[in-house]
Image (cartoon, coloured by chain):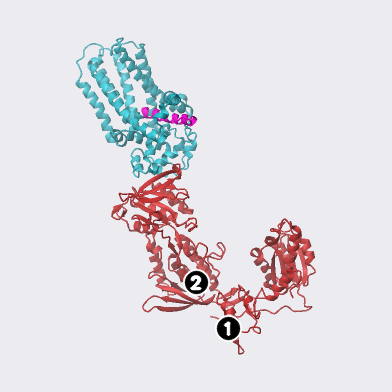
Amino acid sequence: MTGPVDVQIGKPPEEGDGQRRIGVFICHCGGNISDYVDVAAVRDALKDEPGVVVAETTMFACSDGTQHDMIDQIREQGLDGLVVASCSPKLHQITFRGVSKRADLNPYAYTQVNIREQDSWAHGDDPDGATQKAINLVRAGIGRTRNSEPLVPLVVETTPATMVVGAGIAGMRAAIGLADTGLQVYLVEREPEVGGWAGRFGAMFPNDRSGREQIAALTEQVSRRSSITVLTGAQLVGKSGSFGNYEAVVEVAGDPPETIRATVGSIIIATGFDSYEPENGEFGYGIDGVLTLPEFKELVDAAGGGTLVHLGRPVRSIAYVYCVGSRQPGGNEYCSKFCCAATAHASILVSALDPQIRQFHLNRGVRTYGKYELMYTQARENGAVYMTYPDDTPPSVEQGRDGRLAVTTTDTLTGGREVTIPADLVVLVTGMVPRANTGLTDLLKLPVGDDGFYNEIHPKLRPVETVVDGVMVAGSCQGPKTATESVASGMAAVAQSAAILKKGVAELDPLVATVHVDDCTGCGECLTTCPYDAISTRDAGGRTVAEVSAAVCKGCGGCVPLCPTAALDLLGYTDAQMTAMIDSLVEVPVS
Amino acid sequence: MSSMVDVDLLADMKKFGAVDVSACFSCGNCTAICPLADNDATFPRRVIRLAQVGLKDDLLASKELWTCYHCGLCSDSCPTDADPGEFMATARRYAIASYDRTRLARVLFTSTLGGTIIAIAVAAFFATFMYGMREPVEGSTLALFEFVPYPVIHWLGIAVMGLMAVAGLAGVATMVVRISRHEGVTFRSLLGGKAQLGRAWKAAWSSVAVESLGQRRYREDCKDDAPVEPWYRRRWFIHAMTIWGFLGLLAATTINYALDIVGVKATGTPVPIWYPTRLLGTVAGLMLMYGVTWFMINRATKYNRAAMTSKPSDWLLLILLFLTGLTGFVIEVALYVPDAPTWGYWFFLLHVAVAMELMLLLPFTKFAHAIYRPVALFFYSLAGERTRTPELV
């Protein structure tokens, strides 16, 4: 545990002649920039700017050779500021911050100026204008670096504990993994029982092991680890503190309800999915014998004795209607991706039960990706007929006078013929929808995508982290996943949690808001604006002043313009820096 | 119009052949390689799809089913070993059984035991019946038509042909109605005017003369059987010899009958070998035996794709044809043996009984393709003519 953390601001460089020593590198980017921007003219226009000691053009600033050259120049010329005019900071800001670090230059004295995406690529029709714009942009960048202050990352001590919200297959497996890394674990489950969806099912793909048995095995493993605290009938209702040291409040149902508080370093959200619930009448939903995929799976799991019986009648034919609630324009547009494989698997189970049952799979293209293709093949070879219907001609389900269901569809492979299939069961292959978790979403300020699932920071490179530091998402709360994939992402969240908590300390970006205590009047205006509750007040020699918790602050800058006395500054983007940039960009300097 | 799926179709069809069309994923390699799948024809793929889905009515209204000569290229190129060629053969068996309302064909195709019992029982019935009607014979030459009196054979033959015709025509009528409905062929589009009649005539000529007798597409398009055979072992040649041999024998018999009626030559009168109808019969018999023998060798040795799978129904037709031909030649030999050997009479009895059975069972066995295929080819050719003359109804 740590107390309040202060931003450590280094001293400004020695004033000497009052001038900074800045190196400016202007990149050709092959020809991406230099084909439209006269980079030599840019260099010539800026080489005499105040504080500029080195001004060079380079073919590829990001190349290994140039990076070495920059380091040499920084050292030899004693540079205290670096400006690289090249591509978007998204691409290479980290690269050149790294260059600065290696040359013992404070990385926050570095400014990346984007003269490619925001200049050469955008103004290919106007080279002169592009060159002038580049000069202005680079001059602004020099202005920012000239006014930079050295910053160092915040270091916070972390609590070696993680809270896992959701005890489905992903959450349970993650809890075990976390415990095995030596972390304390709180496993919080809203339902009275752990296990989630998997706990309801019999044989699951791909290895045909029963979901119930797998959950039982996980439950047993959880119970053997004393470092895991399982809270069922429990919900996360409060969260305060900051990354590394969250205070979580859990309410456990009961009479009276019990409130449990826990300090955790990170939180893994594994709240899973809801199965799409069709509208009444959607593909005949509501008629006896029209089931959703989970309802059907439970029917198959419960069946025995070589037959499948529904409502007392033996089932002789089944029609599956795919993509119900998925891939629907104007509805859930995403593909739920597990359902084709799950249905192929259910189809195989049905064939094993009674090979005489005819099964018709009315699909919009089968997506049994990867190894699941083998299940698709097996289902077909067992006699299942896959019939693709055109997107604009969905099947219709009706009940005949004899009570039997009739599914009418268009079969592309029969030359687009409309055919009617008599069916005893119609299975609506329903996809995954985001679970209704408004309370949790609001509490943790979790980012939600257009589809309603939680968003990670980066689908490839930061697949389980969210923009809320220390809060991770795993499993199908993040988007449709198979159980296999859910567990894998749960384990990724374990690795990420361990990576940040096992060190005992965490480094935070120092680009946060700061209070100039002398200027602060304690009016409290800023307190109301912070979306992260990072600002509080404190007593400073008898005066009430604002205080920013650097560990909580995200550096959004929302509070800065609201301060009536300009007592707030965003480090790395201080008023002095911004003013200098604006001055560089306009003809008449702002006084 | 929505077609009703018959969920039991595939299970029912499986009784007619050991093919596993579930393996088929409609890739269409079979259609691509089929030398007969021209223009927008999509067989065998489409026909397999009909069976998979259970579109029984469409399947039984399929003229494409009967264009196939089972060269086996599709089965060789099938990536899932669904054996489309054998499926087509199975579907034809199923169609024959479906066009027949007596269910006799169904038993003959689906039950080895039942089929064998029926095959033996029918021959035994004819033999017993004729034996019961026999007259005492004497003399140094075989008096076959005195042993089994000519009127007995004559009237029994007429009865057999009559029954066969009724059953055959009923089957053909069922088939014609189904295909016509499916293809939108009406009386008007066939006979509505001179142009329509001309079109129908062209189709009939192509179906009967060019394709059935001339074996044009079998000869020209389905020639890619692998390995490439010498001409005398080509499947089309063997098939043609069988057809021509059978038709030659039928012609010889019919002409003999006509000669009897006009009083030129009474049936049973000994004639020299060069006598035209006897010569025709002998040559035709040799051709039939040639074809049938090769077919049997092919099936026994699984010589090619078509002979890879043999159902009892395949053997039944070959055996009946073979026995008819063989006993015929044995009788020819017996006629030259001095002192009228008794076995000559027995072979005669067997010959007539098997020939009667062959004709009686024609609509119920694989032999039925001899009537269904030309009808289907007529519609196939007509469809082509209709595309060329869209302005006619």
- Residue underneath mark 2: A442
Front residue of this view, candidates B39 and A6: B39
Q: Position of residue A244 (x, y in %)?
A: 54, 75
Callout count? 2
Q: Nearer the viewer, residue B79 or B335?
A: B79
Q: Check if residue B383 falls in the magenta segment.
A: yes
Residue B67 in view (yes/no)? yes
Q: Which residues are magenta?
A: B369-393
Q: Is residue A149 visible?
A: no
- The mark that comes first in sequence, 1 or 2, is 2
Q: Quadrant of residue B133?
A: top left
Q: Which mark is residue A364?
A: none
Name the element at disc 1: strand
Q: Is residue A92 left or right of residue A238?
A: right
Q: From the viewer's perspective, is A589 left or right of B295?
A: right
C-alpha gap between disc 1 and disc 2: 24 Å
Residue at horizontal 31 percent and vertical 23 percent from the top: B324
Label 2 residue SS = helix
Q: Which chain is red?
A: A
Q: Amino acid at mark 2?
A: Asp
Q: Amino acid at mark 1?
A: Thr
Residue A302 location in percent, x, y? 33, 58
Query: Where's residue A572, x and y in %?
Result: 66, 73
Q: Which chain is cyan?
A: B
Which of the two residues, B131 or A296, is positioned nearer the viewer here? A296
Q: Are marks 1 and 2 in contact (CB under 8 Å)?
A: no
Please determine whether, in this image, residue A22 is positioned above or below residue A324: below
Q: Which residue is mark 1?
A: A537
- Res. B336 image quadrant: top left
